[in-house]
Image: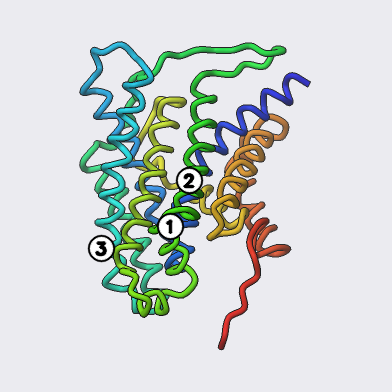
Amino acid sequence: MSTFVQQLVNGLSLGSIYALIALGYTMVYGILRLINFAHGDVYMVGAYVGYYGSVRFRGLTPSYPRAIAIMFLSMAVCALLGVAIERFAYRPVRGAAKMTSLITAIGVSLLLENGGQLLFGADPKFFPSNAPHTEFNVANVRITSEQLTVFVVSIGLTILLLFFIQRTRTGKAMRAVSFNLDAAKLMGISTDRIIAITFALGSAFAAAAGVLVAMAIPKIDPLMGIMSGLKAFVAAVLGGIGNVPGALLGGLIIGIAEVFTVGYLSPTYRDAIAFAILIGILLFRPQGILGRVEKEKV
């Protein structure tokens, strides 16, 4: 029983990372009906910004204020990166065919991956310790402070995002743009500004995930965002892409499924399980667990 609970804890921790990345996918899709395949690479950039920020303060004693400062630095830089990607890559092709936007997203992804290898170097780097490491043993179940931090931050950011969308003026404008972009323009909403804010928020959440995973697994490289980004996309589809709680739920399910597959079947199927779930959800419930069927006028 303790082994099962241990795997569950590990799965929740991993799934929280996927959930944070999936939030960016689901927000952008909800506004623009665009799959931002560069989002996983923004997660990689966030990890590297956190790495260089950590190196800058390497001599200081690990502490939670230091870890929070590093995370906010990474989130701020990646928020600006997200705005730049939207302004210079996606906005010029917004009125073009969906295939054009999709190809542009793939191009931005390749640009970030190869640019990351040129800028940061292709060799892996090891993330310095920013926060004190603590382990808890509860009924033979090992829980680390990093796992607790990842889970709490993921839940906390999701709640803050829901509050922002439901209770603020900008959040209401985001919902209006998501419902009908052209009608929102006619109502005087600056749709370009709302879309830029959406990219900034999604990219900031990806950066938070990058820093958190680097704290828990302190090895980063310029291609780390490829598979994590794809699994987070699967999580967004599973939960119901465009649905914020669905992104959280989908991320947790993918994380738990992956860890249980490694623990009880074979590490060989670690990556395959996410895509098996994707195929299953597309076949039996394409709108996702919390998604709704939307009728489109032809």
Determine the residue positioned at 40% across, 74% down. Answer: 184
Q: Residue at x 61, y 44 (%)?
A: 254
Residue situated in front as seen by the camera: 167 or 278: 167
Q: Position of residue 114 (x, y in %)?
A: 28, 49
Disc 1 or 3, which lies upstream in sequence? 3
What kind of residue is marked 2? Met
- Determine whether 84 is above or below 260 in the image: below
Of 205 and 229, the residue lying toward us: 205
Seen as rendered, the residue at the extreme right is: 1
Residue 176 in percent (x, y) is at 45, 68
- Left or right: 191, with 254 as reference point: left
> What residue is drawn where x is 28% and y is 56%?
83
Disc 1/disc 2 C-alpha distance (Å): 30 Å
Residue 227, disc: 2
**Amino acid type indicated by mark 1:** Gly
Q: Which residue is mark 3?
A: 87
Q: How far apart are the two marked residues, 1 and 3, measured between alpha carbons?
A: 20 Å
In percent of width and height, residue 244 lies at 54, 52
Question: At 56% from the left edge and 53% from the top edge, which residue is drawn?
Answer: 234
Q: Amino acid at mark 3?
A: Arg
Is 292 displayed left or right of 107 in the figure?
Answer: right
* Tag in front: 1 or 2: 1
Instruction: Give the residue pinned by disc 1.
Output: 171
Q: Residues within 10 Å of mark 2 (few under 14, many from 20)?
A: few
- The answer to which of 120 and 48 lies nearer the viewer is 48
